[in-house]
Each structure stands twice: as structure tokens, then as C-alpha cells.
């Protein structure tokens, strides 16, 4: 089989590299290039002579590729979006994951589907990692807020650390609110009273 | 009763105003709807997500529902247009360099379509002229081609067209990738503000009352949820009427300036809403009557003849047989769904569903249920009219 040239168009460099790693790890006969700068995208893709273009749906440059897809005949290498009746599910999964695929006419569908599915899984993996990171950051910042509120209570009411924490917890439970919310309210009020 | 929730995709443009106002000013809520407006960076995303059923309804370029129904472009899906969101609202601009070659330093000819068209074609004899338009299936492409043809040019030979998303139009112009553009506000005004462009025509100078954006809905969704669709059209109609009161436009501009909508300064947005455009770096203001239209039956009625004009113009380029396109156009714009939705609002609806486009020199009363519907003017710059039955 001939070597496939895949262009990954993604301003998100980390994600682009994950896709490159994924593709190179899974397929032997593949060349992958990353296009991060999207000015004059249609020209860059033509110059790269890519067989498959994987494109982030958050990119406004996507519409520029539409012209390549629309211009039949005049193009040396006609490009079409990867849609086909038997693959409606793959297309839907790709769109939901946030990636679109454009392919040069005449490539073997099964090979392309494997590539597109790899890109989908990498987009999902990045989204999951980011969600986890955001959750960790949130937890860390809540932890800090609670520690500050404890400190305020210990100073103002002469409590031990355990007593201060118990008081915050009791208040949160009585009011039916999150511990971090009660802590935040206490800090805000203390700043007003200062 | 819980509110019906609808996810609607939109592209950041002044002509998305009816959707944003319907949501923000509570018209949708009063009709029992919860709208979730999702900003999309490209028309391709709107098309694909609508085709795959991720959006039951979306802000669409007026030719998109027909193009999708006919399968022109990547995704085929039966999409209807039961409501015209916006009339006009775009402008043609040229780079500072092209403006100089067109001899625009002399007396001001802003809005003179014939003079500007001839000047552009003359310049294009001496140098290549690339014109940016937001999407292959758009009114921008149709109006640019109609204009250049009407000025004696051949759009396929004399100029080239490039697809450039609206928010990137300024950069493309500054980078020399394009020399001119046709784009919806506020992106033309932004190009002027950055010193990259001079506006030469409002879209209305080419066709005085051109359908620009439509609400596109999947046929199967429309058929399964007729009451929700009707409620949505009423919410949009009330939003359009609200936008028709000049006193509300400053508020609308403030709402739309927010980062989750357009994310540009409200003063720039206000230019497009009022039709008072600053046309060059000197800050000279030109006011265009009927620059943009949202209000009332006159702006929002989905005339079959509007879709048939698009079909007649675009079918050859879309690779579709003209008779097939004409028939599909008649089935795509849906005045019947519009009438069914607006009856409870006692809006005065026209007797006909199709008309001769571009025939009205001035404002006239037309046959309607209550005899109080006025239309026009709606002329094309070259004085020709489009008779869908001819």
C-alpha cells in the first residue's frame, strides 16, 4: 500500500501532537504533518499534498476548505468531506468529538475510517484530560478557600483547627450548601467587616 | 409546564439579532421556549450539525436550506426555511490599494453600484482582483456575481472568489490574500476601523430587499414538532418587531457585543443595526435607508420567489438542473408554516406566496388579509425584475 499523507490542522499544539503520536503508533504507512498557522489554509494544504486532512471544528478556516470541496474539475486533487452513507455514524461521532475529515477522492474507505476513528479517540482523550485538570484545579482552589475560612474562625473565636472545620461543616449541612460556599461567604463577610 | 428546549447554532453577525433578542428579551420564554444559542465559527459547522440533527434549527445563509436539500456541498439533508431572519445587512469593501486604483479619491460615489462595478472591473483589467465571500452557497456570492455581470463583467474570468469566514475577512485583506469582500456587519466596519478597507456599497445598492439569512429547520423536526416550531417563529417575529423600533437598537447592540455573542464593540455593531456606516479611515458616515431589515411581515415572510431567484442564479454552479432547482425552491421556503405560526399574532399576511422580485419602485399597499400590508421598494440596481413564473 502507498504511504498516506495526513495533515492535522489544529491550533492546539498538544492535541495535534497526540494525534500525530496516535497515528504513527497505529499505522506504518503514514506521513503526518501539523499545520498550526491557518492563514491561507487552502494553499498550505494544496502545497502539503495531503491525502487526508483532519481539522478542528473550532477553526473558522474550515469554510475555506469548503471551497476546495466545491471546486470540482479545476482542482488537481479533488477533496471531499468524509461523508458517505455507510459511514454516517463515523461522521456523526467525528462532528460530536469536534473534528472533521476531508479526503482526496478515490482512497480506500476502510483505511480512512481507521484514521478518522483514531482522531476521534484522541479528541475525546484530550477533552477528558482537560475536564479532569479543571476539576483538580477547582478542588485545589476550594481547599485553599476552606483553609482560609478555618483560619479566620480560629482567630476570631479562639477555636482549634478541628473545631473550626466542624463548625463550617455543621453550618453547611444546616443551610444545605456546599462547604466551599460557606467558606467563601465567611471570607467575603470578614473582608467587609475589616 | 416545562419549557421546550431548542439548541440553535449561529454565526457571530449582526444579522443574528432576531435570535439573540428573542432569547435575551424574553420573547422565546413568553412563547414557552428555552433557547440555547451556540456560537459556531464556521458555516460548515452549522450545515453539518443541522444535517446530523444536532441542531433542530439554525441561523443559515439564505441559499443554505436549498443547497442542503439539493445536496450541493458536502452534506445532504432536507432543510426548510419557514422564516427569513434578515434582509440585507452586508457591505462590499475594497482594500486601500484597490480603492486607489479604482480612482475613489475623487467625488464620493458610495452606494452607486454601476459606477463602483465599472471601476472595479477596469482595475481588474490591470491586476488580479480576489474577492472574499463567507461561503460558496451564500447571498454574498450571488449578489457579487449579479452586480459584476450587470456591469458588463464576467465574474468567472475577470475576478476570482475566495471563501473567507467573516471574522477573518480583515486579516485576509491585510495579508493581501483578498483585495475586496462582501460580508455581513460588523466585519466590514471592523475592516474600516483597522484602516484596511474602504466600503463602496451597501448590499442594498445591488438588490434593495434581498433575503440574507433564514431560519433553517430539518423537515423531520418541523413535522414532528409543529407547535414548537410555531412558537419559535412567533418569538422571532416579536423580536424582529422589537428591533424595528430605533429606540431599541442601542440596547440590542449592547446585548450583542457580549463575548458569547459577537464579542466586538457595541458602537461597531450599532452601525450595522442603524445603517449609518463609517466608510473610510476619515470616519465619514454614510446612511443607507433600508440597509438591514428584521421587522414585520415585509422582512420575515419566506416568499417562494426569493428561493426561486436563488435557484435560478445558483443552479448551474451547483451542478443542478434548473427545473429541479426551481421545484425544490418552491418546496424549501415555506410560507404555509409561517402563516400557521403567525395567525395568533394577528399579523397582516399577504394573499400570495410568491411575487415578482425587484418590481417595486416605491412603497405600495399589497393584497392582504386586513389590507394594511405595505411592501417596497425592492429594486435591483440594473432595473431588471425577476418573475418566478416566467
Image (cartoon, coloured by chain):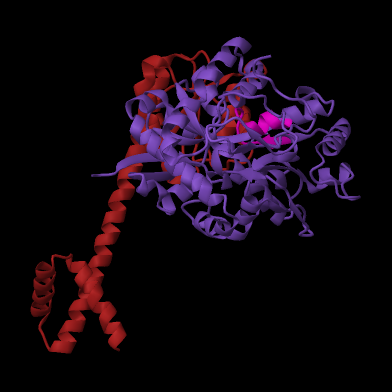
Chain colours: A red, B purple
Q: Name the spot of residue A81 as percent of width and height, x first.
A: 49, 23
Judged left or right of residue A178, residue B358 is right
Q: Name the spot of residue A176 as percent of width and height, x first.
A: 13, 65
Q: Name the spot of residue A1 as percent of width and height, x first.
A: 45, 13
Residue at the image point whose x is 60% and y is 56% from the top = B246
In depth, the one of B167 and B80 nearer the eye is: B80
Residue at the image point whose x is 25% and y is 71% from the top = A144
Residue at the image point whose x is 35% and y is 35% from the top = B228
Q: On the image, which quarter does residue A154 sit in?
A: bottom left
Q: Is residue A126 above or below residue A167?
A: above
Residue at the image point whose x is 47% and y is 46% from the top = B238
Q: Is residue B140 magenta?
A: yes
Q: Name the spot of residue A186 as percent of width and height, x first.
A: 22, 78
Q: Is residue B290 something that shows in the picture?
A: yes
Which residues, given as a range, are shown in magenta?
Answer: B131-144
In depth, the one of B23 and A157 nearer the eye is: B23
Amino acid at each position: 500500500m502507498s504511504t498516506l499523507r495526513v495533515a492535522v490542522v489544529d491550533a492546539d499544539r498538544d492535541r495535534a501532537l497526540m494525534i500525530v503520536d496516535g497515528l504513527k503508533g497505529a499505522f506504518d504507512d503514514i506521513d503526518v504533518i501539523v499545520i498550526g498557522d491557518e492563514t491561507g489554509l487552502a494553499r498550505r494544504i494544496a502545497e502539503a499534498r495531503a491525502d487526508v486532512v483532519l481539522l478542528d471544528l473550532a477553526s473558522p478556516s474550515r469554510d475555506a476548505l469548503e471551497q476546495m470541496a466545491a471546486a470540482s474539475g479545476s482542482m488537481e486533487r479533488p477533496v471531499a468531506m468524509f461523508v458517505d452513507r455507510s459511514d454516517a455514524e463515523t461522521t456523526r461521532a467525528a462532528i460530536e468529538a469536534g473534528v472533521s475529515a476531508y479526503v482526496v477522492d478515490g482512497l480506500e474507505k476502510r483505511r480512512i475510517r481507521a484514521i478518522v476513528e483514531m482522531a476521534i479517540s484522541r479528541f475525546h482523550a484530550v477533552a477528558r484530560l482537560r475536564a479532569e485538570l479543571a476539576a483538580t484545579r477547582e478542588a485545589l482552589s476550594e481547599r485553599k478557600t476552606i483553609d482560609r475560612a478555618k483560619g479566620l474562625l480560629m482567630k476570631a473565636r479562639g477555636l482549634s483547627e478541628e473545631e473550626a472545620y466542624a463548625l463550617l461543616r455543621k453550618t453547611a449541612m444546616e443551610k444545605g450548601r456546599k462547604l466551599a460556599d460557606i467558606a467563601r461567604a465567611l471570607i467575603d463577610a470578614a473582608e467587609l467587616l475589616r | 409546564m416545562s419549557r421546550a428546549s431548542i439548541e440553535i447554532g449561529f454565526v457571530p453577525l449582526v444579522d443574528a439579532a432576531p435570535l439573540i433578542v428573542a432569547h435575551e428579551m424574553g420573547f422565546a420564554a413568553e412563547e414557552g421556549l428555552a433557547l440555547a444559542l451556540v456560537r459556531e465559527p464556521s458555516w460548515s459547522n452549522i450545515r453539518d450539525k443541522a444535517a446530523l440533527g444536532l441542531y433542530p434549527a439554525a441561523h443559515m445563509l439564505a441559499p443554505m436550506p436549498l443547497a442542503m436539500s439539493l445536496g450541493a456541498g458536502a452534506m445532504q439533508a432536507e432543510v426548510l426555511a419557514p422564516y427569513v431572519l434578515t434582509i440585507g445587512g452586508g457591505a462590499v469593501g475594497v482594500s486601500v490599494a484597490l480603492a486607489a486604483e479604482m480612482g475613489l479619491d475623487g467625488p464620493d460615489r458610495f452606494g452607486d453600484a454601476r459606477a463602483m462595478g465599472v471601476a472595479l472591473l477596469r482595475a481588474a483589467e490591470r491586476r488580479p482582483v480576489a474577492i472574499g465571500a463567507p461561503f460558496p452557497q451564500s447571498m454574498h456570492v450571488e449578489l457579487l456575481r449579479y452586480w459584476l455581470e450587470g456591469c458588463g463583467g464576467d465574474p468567472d474570468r475577470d475576478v476570482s472568489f475566495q471563501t473567507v469566514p467573516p471574522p477573518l475577512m480583515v486579516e485576509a485583506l491585510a495579508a493581501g490574500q483578498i483585495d475586496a469582500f462582501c460580508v455581513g456587519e460588523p466585519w466590514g466596519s471592523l475592516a474600516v476601523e483597522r484602516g484596511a478597507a474602504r466600503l463602496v456599497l451597501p448590499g442594498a445598492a445591488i438588490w434593495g430587499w434581498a433575503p440574507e439569512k433564514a431560519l433553517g429547520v430539518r423537515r423531520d423536526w418541523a413535522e414532528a414538532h409543529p407547535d414548537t416550531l410555531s412558537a419559535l417563529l412567533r418569538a422571532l417575529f416579536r423580536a424582529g418587531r422589537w428591533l424595528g423600533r430605533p429606540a431599541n437598537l442601542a440596547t440590542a447592540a449592547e446585548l450583542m457585543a457580549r463575548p458569547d455573542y459577537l464579542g466586538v464593540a457595541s458602537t461597531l455593531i450599532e452601525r450595522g443595526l442603524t445603517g449609518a456606516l463609517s466608510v473610510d479611515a476619515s470616519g465619514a458616515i454614510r446612511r443607507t435607508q433600508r440597509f438591514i431589515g428584521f421587522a414585520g411581515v415585509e422582512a420575515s415572510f419566506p416568499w417562494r420567489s426569493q428561493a426561486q431567484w436563488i435557484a435560478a442564479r445558483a443552479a448551474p454552479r451547483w451542478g443542478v438542473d434548473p427545473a429541479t432547482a426551481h421545484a425544490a425552491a418552491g418546496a424549501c421556503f415555506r410560507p404555509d408554516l409561517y402563516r400557521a405560526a403567525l395567525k395568533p399574532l394577528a399579523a397582516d399576511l399577504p394573499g400570495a406566496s410568491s411575487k415578482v422580485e425587484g418590481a417595486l419602485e416605491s412603497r405600495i399597499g399589497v393584497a392582504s388579509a386586513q389590507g394594511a400590508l405595505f411592501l417596497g421598494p425592492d429594486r435591483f440596481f440594473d432595473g431588471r425584475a425577476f418573475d418566478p413564473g416566467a
